[in-house]
Image: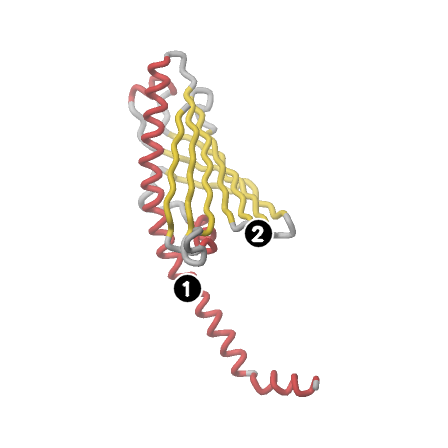
């Protein structure tokens, strides 16, 4: 078994990162992810926790020596279960591969949480993957695990770049929306100031 660990910061608040996560794919950088399908979505703890299950379709080039072991197809499927917890302010995503799982098993855990140094403006990303190959020949087993770790590292870098581009666009839309809501509320209050003032007077 091999472990892959990764962590970095996003210069956006946790609320924006969590909301933008559902818009992460497709993007121009992470082209290996070609489809994301929602299988179920449920609310728990009086609406404070959202649990989602998704099927992720991945397509990427595979070396010939690997196709000799697992077959010729470069299309694979991943099951992901995510939990958004408003009380702990965490977004946790756990996933595992469904394709070729008898030969190679990958368990990945990703967590987004407010950055401890700047929780209002930054989000901390932590990622861990356990990669285990089940091949009779030890040399091939090690080689397959090493390749998978390197592929994971490459995709993690692309994923960071792709999500940064998505967050940039999403943040602009988020700020415009919040600004419009704020202006709307302000206009409503100013436009009805006399009515509000009279209502308080009548109560007294």
Q: In what quadrant of the picture does the N terminus appear?
A: top left
Q: Which residue lies furthest to the front in this view?
A: 117
**Horizontal and vertical percent position of residue 188:** 53, 78
The crowd level at tag 1 (other Cα within 10 Å; few <14, some 14-19, many 20+) is few
Label 2 vs label 1: CA separation?
24 Å
Residue 98, compared with residue 88, is above or below; it is above
Does residue 137 appear left or right of residue 184 in this picture?
left
Q: Helix, strand, or loop for circle 1?
A: helix
Q: Name the residue under label 1.
A: 175
Q: Provide residue 82's location: percent of width, then percent of height.
A: 52, 42
Name the residue located 37 percent from the left edge and 12 percent from the top edge. 137
Toward which corner of the image does residue 110 lie, by quadrant?
top left
Image mark for residue 47: none
Question: Residue sitting at 29 percent across and 21 percent down?
Answer: 64
Using the image as rendered, state which of residue 13 and residue 98 is in the foreground: 13
Most distant residue in the top direction: 137
Sooner in the amino-acid sequence: mark 2 or mark 1: 2
Say left or right for 68 vs 196.
left
Judging depth in this view, the residue of 141 and 117 nearest the camera is 117
The count of marks equals: 2
Q: Quadrant of residue 159?
A: top left
Q: Which x, y percent locates residue 170?
A: 40, 56
How packed mark 2 is, by other alpha carbons closer than 10 Å (few <14, some 14-19, many 20 or more), is few
- Residue at image position (48%, 71%) is 182
Q: Residue 87 carries which label?
A: 2
Q: Quadrant of residue 16?
A: bottom left
Colour pattern? secondary structure
């Amino acid at each position: 078994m091999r472990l892959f660990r990764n962590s970095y910061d996003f210069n956006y608040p946790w609320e924006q990162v969590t909301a933008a996560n559902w818009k992460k794919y497709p993007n121009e950088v992470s082209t290996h992810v070609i489809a994301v399908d929602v299988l179920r979505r449920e609310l728990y703890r009086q609406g404070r926790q959202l649990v989602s299950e998704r099927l992720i379709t991945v397509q990427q080039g595979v070396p010939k020596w690997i196709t000799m072991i697992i077959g010729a197809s470069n299309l694979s499927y991943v099951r992901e279960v995510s939990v958004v917890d408003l009380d702990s302010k965490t977004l946790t995503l756990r996933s595992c591969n469904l394709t070729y799982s008898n030969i190679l098993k990958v368990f990945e855990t990703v967590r987004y949480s407010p950055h401890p140094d700047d929780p209002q403006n930054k989000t901390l990303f932590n990622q861990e993957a356990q990669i285990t190959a089940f091949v009779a020949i030890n040399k091939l087993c090690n080689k397959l695990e090493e390749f998978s770790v390197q592929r994971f590292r490459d995709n993690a870098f692309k994923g960071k770049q792709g999500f940064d581009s998505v967050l940039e666009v999403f943040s602009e839309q988020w700020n415009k929306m919040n600004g419009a809501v704020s202006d709307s509320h302000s206009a409503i209050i100013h436009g009805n100031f006399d009515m509000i003032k009279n209502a308080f007077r009548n109560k007294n």
